[in-house]
Image (cartoon, grey):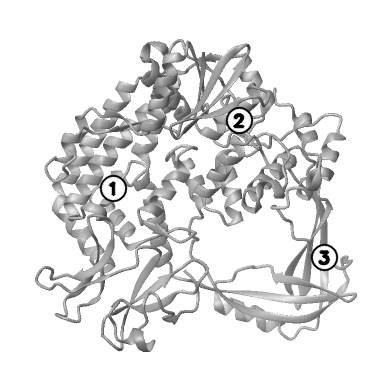
Amino acid sequence: MRLIICEKDNAAKRISDILSNGHFKTEKRGRVPVYLFVWENERTVTLGLRGHIINMDFPKSYNNWSAVDPIELIDVKPERMVSAKGIASVLSSLAKEADRVYVATDYDREGELIGKEAVEYAFGSGQLEKAMRAHFSSLTPDEIRRSFSSLGRMDLHLASAAETRQIVDLVWGAALTRFISLASGRLGHDFLSVGRVQSPTLALIVNREKEISAFVPEPYFRIEALLGRDGLDFEAAHVEGDIFDQGKAKEIFSKVKDAKEGVIIDVKERERTDRPPVPFNTTQFIRAANNLSLSAARIMSIAEDLYTNGYISYPRTDNTVYPRDLDLRKTVDSLAKGPYMEAASHILSKEKITATRGSKQTTDHPPIYPTAFATKAELGRERFKIYDLVVRRFLATLHDPCRVKVTSVRTDINGETFTSSGIRIISPGWRSVYTMSVVKEKELPPLEKGVRVKVEEISLLDKETKPPRRFSQGGLIQEMERLGLGTKSTRHEIIQKLYSRRYIEESPPRPTLSGSALIDALEKHARMITEPDMTSRLERDMERIANRELTQDAVVMESREMLRKVLRTMEKEKAAIGRDIASALKEQDVVGKCPRCSNDLLLVRSKWGKRYVRCSRFPGCSKSYPLPQKGKITFSGNICEVCRSPMMTLYSRGKRPREVCINPACPGKRAGTGGSEGEKGKNIKGSS
């Protein structure tokens, strides 16, 4: 029997469908589906895993945070533990019947490790050299058949790079998280997570927020005019642009404010050629898709789904150059329908189809491109948004340049020079299909040197400089890539982790009080944790493992010595770190004053993770309040007029925020004054 191991169930089902020409049977082994068919006259079974079925953790004897010094964890050898017992059991059972095994997981670091773990678990490490490996970048019939007709072997160095990352991240994350949590007294569900990649990423967000908060607007002035000729108005601005000298701005304005006409002193025209965009790699894809009002994690989840269903190529890639063996004409021809008909037909009419090329070229996977035609009805609104973006970008990379006529005009108004520009699209080229990139046309009347124009109005505008913008999720991923933080496969997961740990909120992300407090303390006492240098160095080392230039042992040893140095530095500052974090977080935890004893009321979590409010003098004062366990809650400091308990604001998706009394026994809830969770409360304008 042949056994094919896939990374996920939907990939297993699709591969089975392709190799069997649709003649496969689904069986359930417990709750785990397997797919049976005959391939090349042999009985074949395909099993989909659920990503990693083996995880790493420390031995149970190290579970007591208070009893184990975090520095001890540096040299502890992690244990491998089965995390998906049902799937692992089925895998073991199938392995007893199989005489050949094929690994068909995603071809990247993590996919190679997932395949290695499965083969080792089911067959033993002796079978790793014998396991056959299918390499593919899309789940199309042609690609799957090709990959299974030209099988290779597993790349154990690639798997070793991923395993090294697991070990390094476990040791760094566990040791630093325990140290910070113990130092600040934040244990149980209130622990403070610190990580090799997540902490420098959080620092980017926190430091950008500091720049915004510290920004002092600087006043400046602009002098703008509305001019007219032949019944067509056009805009003009003083040649100085932004003028930071108020006296100078007023002096210029006084010369032109009463002008009735101006004279054209120069007209220049030129043609600009805008080249088509380069193919999508993961970073640029997420950045573009972020404009569709989707989070980075959601974007990658949808892309993964489109890939496993055969609509797009593998979405985790650094490559921005299509490989020579990609049949561009055939791919375009498959898309020559519906909304893509016009662009596809134009590209197919060319004698030679030439694609743009980006600066990054790799050999593992091609850039992201569409592999099959689909409609909105097939995919649904959200999935189609992502698919449509991929199709349009692909077609744009093969299309003509966009040609634009740019006109620059200079006008004299009472001795002062004003400039205007006109933009007219001569040929939209690639922008006709990639509608996400827009050139706004500006029409000018026919103008030539010496022509007089009417001054319709002229204004002196007071303006202020703007603070830097927050990172969008796409922009943050691009910055992480630039600094060497994380990989194409993990950057969106790191951002999602910061959200789930309540270090950041909203979109674009901004830090919460706990996120800011953590980074402030780390930058003050252990700056190396928040800087990208060590992390990017380790990422480069893991790449060198994959390229057979370094060994796992060497990189793990190096990372442990780095961590030892960090923890020894932090140990000297332990009391100060704990004090700084606890002091900063007190503001976040205090929700009001106890109506019984006037001490602070604190937002806390039970050992089961349930949130509630209790008096800070507990157990001396037993006053407490239950809270809703779902949804966002904020406390404004307002007091219920009826029972003097704090008011809280509840946020529910699709509804206006409601301010209600925290006290479920508030007499006001009967009268509709204090409100309760089950009643309307007081609506607040705006949304969360």
Query: Tag 1, which secondary structure?
Result: helix
On screen, 621 above or below 289?
below
On screen, 247 above or below 376?
below
Q: Which of marks 2 and 1 is nearer the N terminus?
A: 2
On screen, 303 above or below 117?
below
Q: Which residue is drawn at 35% across and 28% down?
A: 164
| Real-space Cα separation, disc 1 to disc 3, in angstroms | 53 Å
Q: Could you say which is closer to the camera, residue 595 or residue 409?
A: 595
- Badge 3 local density, few (<14 within 10 Å), some, or many (20+)? some
Q: Visible in this render: residue 402?
A: no
Q: Visible in this render: residue 593?
A: yes
- Where on the picture, by quarter, is residue 629? bottom left
| Real-space Cα separation, disc 3 to disc 2, in angstroms | 53 Å
Residue position for label 2: 14
- Badge 2 local density, few (<14 within 10 Å), some, or many (20+)? many
Q: Is residue 70 left or right of residue 95?
A: left
Residue position for label 3: 443
Contact check, label 2 and label 1, Cβ < 8 Å: no
Q: Where is residue 488 in the image (x, y as percent from the top left)?
A: 50, 37
Residue position for label 1: 527
Q: Position of residue 346 (x, y in %)?
A: 85, 40
Mark 2 belongs to which amino acid? Arg
Q: Is residue 156 left or right of residue 73?
A: right
Q: Position of residue 150 (x, y in %)?
A: 61, 14
Comparing labels 2 and 1, the label whose residue is closer to the camera: 2
